[in-house]
Amino acid sequence: MDDSDLAGSVLAALPVSGVSVATMGGLLRSETVSASDETAARLDELQFDLGEGPCWDAVAERRPVLEGSLRGAPVRSWPAFSRALLDHEGVEALYAFPLLLGPLALGAMDLWCDRPGDLPDESARRASALADEVSRHLLRRAVRDVADDQAEEVRVGAYSRRRIHQATGMVLAQADVSAEDAELLLQGHAFSQGVPMTEIADAVLEGRLSFSSGRDGIEER
């Protein structure tokens, strides 16, 4: 899966009109990574410019925001975003799913529909599963993009690798994720802090750093 395929892959699996994938927040810069159409890209742009909308709420609350009637009887109020939507006829419903990996919030996946109505439960479950896959892809991409610059730090000895494996086991238990995702969380946090992965592993092993999947996220002691 590459960035250009992200939105199209999600769109093919769900009964919606368009899809966008955006990174946002402190870990990754705010940008639209992939969009299935111009409308999806413009909806992202509006939310970035205005600082409000379903994608921001989904990330802040770490749960999907499903707005099935943007023009009729919206559940939530986004004054500036709602006014801007008046210029975009045909956007009747918008569903935002947070892109999360354990305690890390990476961005949001927005689905728009040209007809009002709730997203069916089965489609919502499928969208959540796809959001998990997209989250892993985005974090792997971010880590990979800096790997060449940190080549010396990536090449660690057997003892260092053993510490990383031990820390991975602790993160697995703390964040309630798979072993693969636990190691990806270590990599992602090392990337966000600009330090070697071994340094993050040592902090976990020494109890100075703890991962959890709750609201508190990553805790430093």
Image (tube, rainbow, N blue to C red):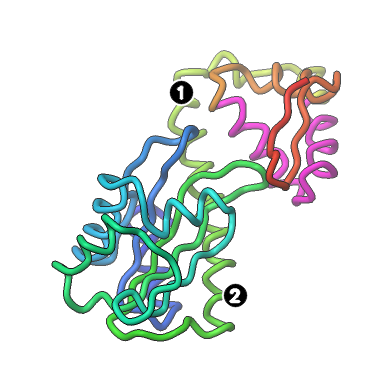
In the image, 24 versus 134, the foreground residue is 24
Magenta stretch, residue numbers: 164-191
Provide the residue designation for mark 1.
148
**Which secondary structure dominates the residues rendered in magenta?**
helix
Identify the residue at horizontal 44%, vertical 36% (top origin). 28
Examine the structure image and report whether residue 194 is included in the region drawn in magenta: no
Identify the residue at horizontal 36%, vertical 51% (top origin). 52
On screen, residue 191 versus residue 40, left or right, reads right
Identify the residue at horizontal 33%, vertical 74% (top origin). 70
Provide the residue designation for mark 2.
125
Is label 1 in contact with label 2 (beta carbons under 8 Å)?
no
- The image quadrant of residue 24 is top left
The spot of residue 142 in percent (x, y) is: 47, 36
In the image, 211 versus 78, the foreground residue is 78
Above or below for 163 versus 13: above
* 1 or 2: tag closer to the N-terminus: 2
